[in-house]
C-alpha cells in the first residue's frame, strides 16, 4: 500500500480558517511538506504551526524567489523524488497550500509530477480573495455580477480589458507591480472604488482605500475593485456597531 | 450589550469543509438562521446538522423560489426585524451561508439591513468553485491565468464576451439555463474543454465532461472551462493511483 498525497488548502492566514478536514489530515499526517523561501521562514508552516506534532517529518520545499523557471523545475523534481520515497513506503504526505491548492497555487507542480502514480486528494481551502471581501465588509459579487481574477504581472492593456468587462475585479500577485497598477486604475477612474488589502486575516492585516496607499506593496497583497461603489469606498470603513467586519 | 451578527461561510456541502472558526461560532451561537426554500428542507441546515445543539433557537428564512424581487424583500425585512430582537437582547445570531457569505450569497440582504446597527463579522468559507476544481483534479487557475466567474442567467453575448477574454471560466447558477449554455459552448468550440459538476463534495456528487450531460441541470451545478485543455478533458477523469481526487 502506498501513501496518499494530500494537497491541503490552509486558508489565507488565520489558523482558524483551516477546514475541519484539512485539520484532521494535517494532524494525522506523518510527513508534512510546505513551500519555503530561500531566506526567512515559511508562511504556510507559520499558519499551522500550532497544530504541528513533534514526531512528524517536515519537508520544506525551498523555492528560490526568482523569475526564471528552471531553478524551480529542479526544486520540484527533487521534491517529487524525495516525497515519493515516503509515499512508496506507505506514509501519507500532506502538502500545505496557502489559500486553496488549485487557485494559483504552487501545489500543481507536485501534483503534475505525482498524481498519476499515487492516490491524491485535494482539500479545497478558503481563498484570500473571499477573506478580502469579508475584511472589506462588502460582498465581492452578487446576483448576476461578473467577477474576474486578474494577476498583477499582466500588462496594462491586459488588465484594462478585464476591468472594462467585469463588475468586480480582484487583482492578485501585486507586489512590485503596485505603482503601475495604481496608476492604471487612476487613469481609468477606478481608483476611487478600489480597496487595498495586505496580509488579510493576520494580526498585521492592513485594509484601506487604495487612494491612501503610497508605499510599495508586499507579495501578499491584493486590490478589490467594486465598480460603481465610489460612495461606499469614500465612507469606508463601514461603521457598524463595533466595526467587527475584520475576521 | 447587543449580540453579534455572524455570516458563517459553511462551504460547498461536505460538513468537514467548515472552517474551525465557523464551527466554533456555530456551536456557541444561541440563535441560528438559515435560508430555506418554500418547499423542502434547507440545504444550509443539512450541511451542519450534525453540529447542532438541541437548545438553540432556529430561524429558517423562507425565501420563495421565484424571479420577482419584491416578495424576497418582504422576507428579508421581516427576518431582519425578528433577528434584531435577538441581537438587542444580547444574543449572537449565526447566519448559515452556503459556500462563502460574500461570494454570490444571500447573506448580503441581511447584512445590508443589520450591519450598520450591530457588530457584524463575516467568516469566509470554501467556495464551490474551488471545491469543483479539486473534484475535477485540475488547477482552476495557474501562473498569470485570468479566471472569470460568470452567472448563467446572463445572455449568450455577455457570456461569450467573457469566455473570449479569459483563460479559465466558471459558469455558476446554471439551473434552467443549462441547454442554452451548453449549445453556446459547442458553438464556440469550448464544450470539449469543459467539466460539469453537480452537488460537489456531497455523496451524490456528479463530475463529468460536459459533453456527456444530456439531462437538465439542478440549481447547484456549475461548468468549469479550461481553455486549451481538450486533451485532458478527453482522457478525463485523470487516472491516479486510486482516483482519490474527489474530496
Image: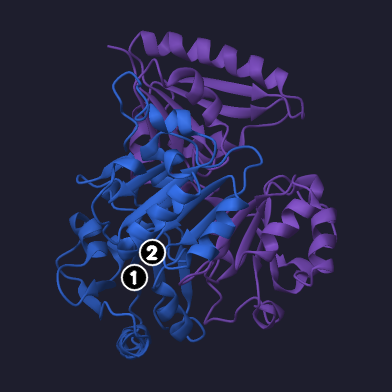
Chain colours: A blue, B purple
**Secondary structure beneath label 2:** strand
Relative to the observer, which residue lies in front, A208 or B246?
A: A208
Q: Chain of mark 2?
A: A
Residue B212 rendering spot, x and y as whole percentages: 80, 68
Residue A209 x, y percent position in the rendering = 35, 39
Residue at image mark 2: A8
Picture mark count: 2
| Quarter containing the N terminus of chain A | bottom left
Q: Identify which residue is drawn at 41% across, 83% down.
A: A2
Label 1 sits on residue: A94
Q: Residue furthest front?
A: A187
- Residue at the image position 84 percent from the left and 67 percent from the top: B187
Q: Is residue A62 left or right of residue B11?
A: left
Q: Please tell me which of labels 2 and 1 falls first in the chain.
A: 2
The secondary element bearing badge 1 is classed as strand
Relative to B78, residue B195 above or below? below
**Where, by quadrant of the figure, is residue A141 drawn?**
top right
**Quarter location, residue B85:** top left
Pick the residue in front: A62 or A87: A62
Q: Tell me which residue sits at (38%, 60%) in the image.
A: A180
Subunit that carries the residue with mark 1: A
Amino acid at each position: 500500500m502506498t501513501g496518499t498525497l494530500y494537497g491541503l488548502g490552509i486558508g489565507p492566514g488565520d489558523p482558524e480558517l483551516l477546514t475541519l478536514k484539512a485539520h484532521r489530515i494535517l494532524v494525522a499526517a506523518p510527513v508534512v511538506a510546505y513551500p519555503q523561501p530561500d531566506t526567512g521562514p515559511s508562511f504556510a508552516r507559520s499558519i499551522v504551526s500550532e497544530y504541528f506534532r513533534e514526531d512528524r517529518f517536515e519537508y520544506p520545499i525551498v523555492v528560490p524567489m526568482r523569475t526564471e523557471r528552471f531553478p524551480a523545475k529542479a526544486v520540484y523534481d527533487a521534491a517529487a523524488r524525495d516525497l515519493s520515497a515516503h509515499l512508496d513506503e506507505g506514509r501519507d504526505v500532506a502538502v500545505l497550500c496557502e489559500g486553496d491548492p488549485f487557485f494559483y497555487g504552487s501545489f500543481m507542480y507536485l501534483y503534475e509530477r505525482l498524481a498519476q502514480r499515487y492516490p491524491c486528494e485535494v482539500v479545497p481551502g478558503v481563498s484570500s480573495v473571499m477573506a478580502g471581501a469579508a475584511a472589506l465588509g462588502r460582498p465581492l459579487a452578487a446576483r448576476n455580477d461578473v467577477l474576474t481574477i486578474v494577476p498583477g504581472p499582466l500588462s496594462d492593456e491586459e488588465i484594462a480589458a478585464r476591468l472594462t468587462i467585469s463588475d468586480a475585479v480582484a487583482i492578485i500577485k501585486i507586489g512590485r507591480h503596485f505603482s503601475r497598477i495604481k496608476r492604471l486604475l487612476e487613469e481609468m477612474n477606478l481608483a476611487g472604488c478600489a480597496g487595498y488589502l495586505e496580509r488579510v486575516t493576520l494580526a498585521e492585516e492592513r485594509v484601506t482605500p487604495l487612494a491612501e496607499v503610497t508605499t510599495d506593496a508586499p507579495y501578499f497583497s491584493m486590490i478589490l475593485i467594486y465598480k460603481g461603489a465610489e460612495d461606499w469606498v469614500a465612507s469606508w470603513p463601514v461603521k457598524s456597531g463595533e466595526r467587527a467586519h475584520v475576521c
